[in-house]
Image: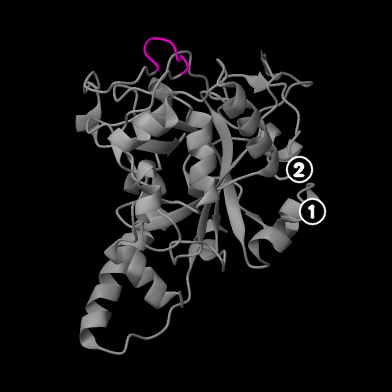
Amino acid sequence: NSTSLNQQQCTAPRTEQTMIAAVAFLFASASCALSPTQAFQVNSSAIGSNSARSSITIAASQPTPLTTVASSTTATTAGDASTDESYLYVPSERDEHYQGNIAKYLLDLDDVGATLDFCGGMMFQLVLSDKLKSHLQTISSNNNNNQPVIHPATQPLMNRTPDYQKSAAADNISIFHGRELRKIPTANGGMGFVLQLSYADPSGAASPIDESHVAGKGADTAWSGKALDPQGWSSEEISTYDGWRGDSFRQWRKGSMYEAEGFDSFSTEFGKEAFGLNHRFFLHLDDRERMWLSAEDGCEGTPSEGRSLMGKLGGILFGK
């Protein structure tokens, strides 16, 4: 079950100071692992905030492609931030560098092994599937209207975005397919966590739920999209998706299950102990104009310039 999957092995701290810090870390980690929807929930004070200070065009009443980039995002490499890559996290430099090419920005975050800071220190490395990378490379080169969008701070939750429905639908623009993956020995951030985004079938459409069109528990509609990405969602993940529900009620998958459903290289890529859970994701700003990658259940992370105290403690506890 998900509770046993979330359990982590740790080494005994050698000093009283380390023990106190470790206990604090484990308490926060357990909150995130066992009750992620609460732990990562967007602060209600951000709802209704104004992001007009930004120089970018963001999704308003309907999601529209960005024309420039200007959120207060920060990013990181596997180690300390490099001054040569400061455009990844310094807003003014990023604006000048990307000129609205969000596809290129996501590709660069993936390329440097950027980490996303969940729950004040749960560091998830961002990883794009090969097919999504290829798609974003095409979009990046053309800089066309299929650019990913960043929703405004007034839409901090997916269910507050226009035309939201509980379904497996994704378009690689406003909503992405993805997974949280754990126990990855090579993941940046020192905690064994990866946030993977993958490619969704752009021809998929909503349809009524019936014997021919199945959907996950509580879904509003079924989705006709196919499993087109060898590293992305399987047909089973699409047909049973219920990411609006709490993680403890959902189907976690180990490597053997991913491989049985078609992701043949899962264990090779992420390790034999890895396991995960699929989510839909979207991008939004907050009232400080930081960019967040947010799951449908409210769990979210923002690109981090460097490892936090909790991230460093995670490295101690998990041998990183």
Q: Is residue 319 magenta?
A: no
Q: Look at the numbered disc 1 and give the secondary structure of its residue.
A: loop
Residue 49: in sight, yes or no?
yes
- The residue located at (43%, 38%) in the rendering is 293
Spot occupied by residue 128 in the image (x, y as percentages of width and height): 59, 44
Taken as a whole, is the magenta stretch helix, strand or loop? loop
Label 1: how many Cα within 10 Å (few below 14, some 14–19, many 20+): some
Q: Look at the numbered disc 2 and give the secondary structure of its residue.
A: loop
- Residue 264 shows which numbered tag? 1
- Corner quadrant of residue 208: top right
Residue 26: in sight, yes or no?
no
Dot 2 and dot 1 residues touching (CB under 8 Å) = yes
Q: Is residue 116 above or below residue 55?
A: below
Q: Residue furthest front?
A: 84
- The residue located at (34%, 61%) in the rendering is 307
| Number of callouts | 2
Q: Nearer the viewer, residue 78 or 187?
A: 78
- The residue located at (56%, 32%) in the rendering is 176
Range covered by the magenta-colored residues: 59-65
Q: Of the residues under marks 2 and 1, which one precedes in the sequence?
A: 2
Spot occupied by residue 60 in the image (x, y as percentages of width and height): 36, 13
- Corner quadrant of residue 74: top left
Q: How is the image coloured?
A: one colour
Q: Is residue 60 magenta?
A: yes
Amino acid type of the residue that numbered disc 2 sits on in the rendered structure: Pro
> Which residue is the site of mark 2?
230
